[in-house]
Image (cartoon, rainbow, N blue to C red):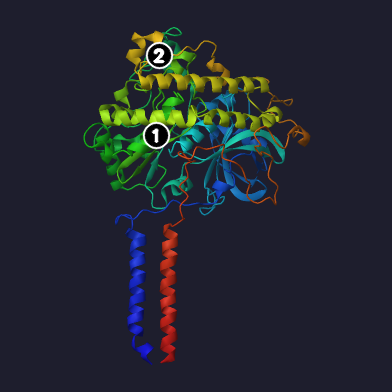
Amino acid sequence: MSTHKHIDRVCAAVLALTLILTVLFIQGKSLGLEAAPSALGYEERLFAAGQVHTIDLRMEDWEGFLETCTNEEYQLCSLTIDGEAVESAAIRAKGNTSLTSVAAYGNDRYSFKVEFDHYDGAGAYHGLDKLSLNNLIQDNTCMKDFLVYRLMAAFGAAAPLCSYVWLTVNGEPWGLYLAVEGIEDAFLERNYGSAGGNLYKPDSMSFGGGRGNGGGFDMEALTEDFAFSDMPERPAEGEGRRQNGGFPGGGMGSSDVKLQYVDDDPDSYPNIFDNAKTALTDADKARLIAALKILGGEGNIEDAVDVEQVIRYLVVHGFVCNGDSYTGSMVHNYYLYEEGGVLSMLPWDYNLAFGGFQTADASGAVNEPIDTPVTGGSLEDRPMAAWIFRSEEHTALYHQYYSEFLSSLLESGWCDALIDETAAMIAPYIAEDPTKFCTEEEFETGVAALKDFCTRRTQSVRGQLDGSIPSTTQGQSENPSALVDCAGLDLSDMGAMGMGGGPGGGFTRDASGRGKPSELPAEENIPAMMPGETDFSPPQEDAGRPSGNTGRMPEQFPEFSASGGGNDGMTSLLLSAGVLAAGLLFAAAFRRRR
């Protein structure tokens, strides 16, 4: 009988515990509690390393879809990913210049964006909501995006997961693509937990700010308004880096896309807020504007920038020389993440990296000065890079990270090994790819040029760090003889702006002239194993999760993965409900005993 005397106290305690858990669930972040990043499941499936995955895309009217791809409108499709069916997904073509280039070349090998949650808000592939399928255009190495994302991840910068896929359409082969994790909800949860901040993809509306920042991009208008022939002449080979300011105003982007502070009015930042990937409040906008103000020099930079993450991002970004980016003349192809008023940068679209964007100057790319990292305007024009050089402490940290990056991932042989293993893995698929943009010989030449570039770039950056090579544009102009010799390196071997999709290239055509894939490659033509023992055979339906290696990832820079215990808000909510239900049942049981 003594138990029922305390039943009210027991119920009160249970209710109090439930209330505490609910408060932590709702207000945990304001109390200093951080949500753990989640392991969602797709990471170890579609993005398992060391193999080429398979995706079969099924649509009722594929030819009709191709005819309207430049409209970037979603259409219903189903997919089979590594033997697992995924129904009711949405697909559209994607890209800026790559989208218009494919159409201009008379080719149908578009890049695609897949949304698993487009028709059903709860739809997902093991937690993945968005997926890009990149067509590898203007990239004879077929691995620029892949390599950069792996370098970013290995160096501890948040980056999308990626893997190669053999794409078939209604059972017929279409080609080798690079699958890239969409930087949206699933990415945010994987890296920052469910209580993360806000995501933006800043882009000037006139340069591809439509659906997916690709709609409305007009390459003809671009070349008319900013004729490349009007750009300043490049220095002769060996005379140092090209001059900044290739476009009027130091780049084509608007001030908000450059992350410059204008004023406190949100309407002054349309190319940021109109391209938000998360729902915004007025407080969110005010917080980001305040961060931009500090970024411009009015305050303590640590209050507005995730110093370590941004430096790691800029180190890898600077090493790979991507002019089609925030630091280049177009001022786009990046994501901006803000949480608690602190900003960080996320990488996107590197198919024109390694000097492939508007340059034939191998020396200018290989010797690109690390302390003048903006190629399309002045350094102060890009405050997200300029802040590093306003402080000796931050500049020293930047140089320290650059040195660590070189020693751990380049000079150690890690990068060369990854390139070799990846080339061996995808070569048989390139040989049989019916829609590829380059020949097998061009692929082999491109891979060799990529390794050569990385070797010479490493030599140049190491020299810039130790002072034997000037690390600024002015210094290189005054002492061009100190630069790394680039004789014999042709950047176009790796692919470049305006290349790809021409006649031939392994792309057969029907009587109408439309691109049409050839027969599925004979299975005996695709060996089961390549040098380095990298398994790339398509997984069987009953094979379960695919397995693979990580390409000898250095221990001090593991593959970036915030795969915590999945301790998200839903878990807290369910736990609260469970405790409350148990308490009520407990109370009811003892009430009956009375």
Label 1 neighbourhood size at 10 Å, few (<14), some (14-19), many (20+)? many
For the residue labelled by badge 1, is the local secondary structure a helix, a strand or a loop? helix
| Residue 293, percent from left and from top | 25, 35
| Residue 244, percent from left and from top | 36, 16
Q: Earlier in the sequence, mark 2 or mark 1?
A: 2
The residue under label 2 is 242
Residue 485 versus residue 593: which sits nearer the camera? Answer: 485
The image quadrant of residue 272 is top left
Per the rendering, the mark at residue 312 is 1
**Horizontally, is 54 left or right of 552 in the view?**
right
Label 2 neighbourhood size at 10 Å, few (<14), some (14-19), many (20+)? many
- Amino acid at circle 1: Arg
Measured along the vertical axis of the image, is residue 13 above or below residue 301? below
Gap between marks 2 and 1 measured at Cα: 25 Å
**Horizontally, is 94 left or right of 329 in the view?**
right
Residue 590 versus residue 124: which sits nearer the camera? Answer: 590
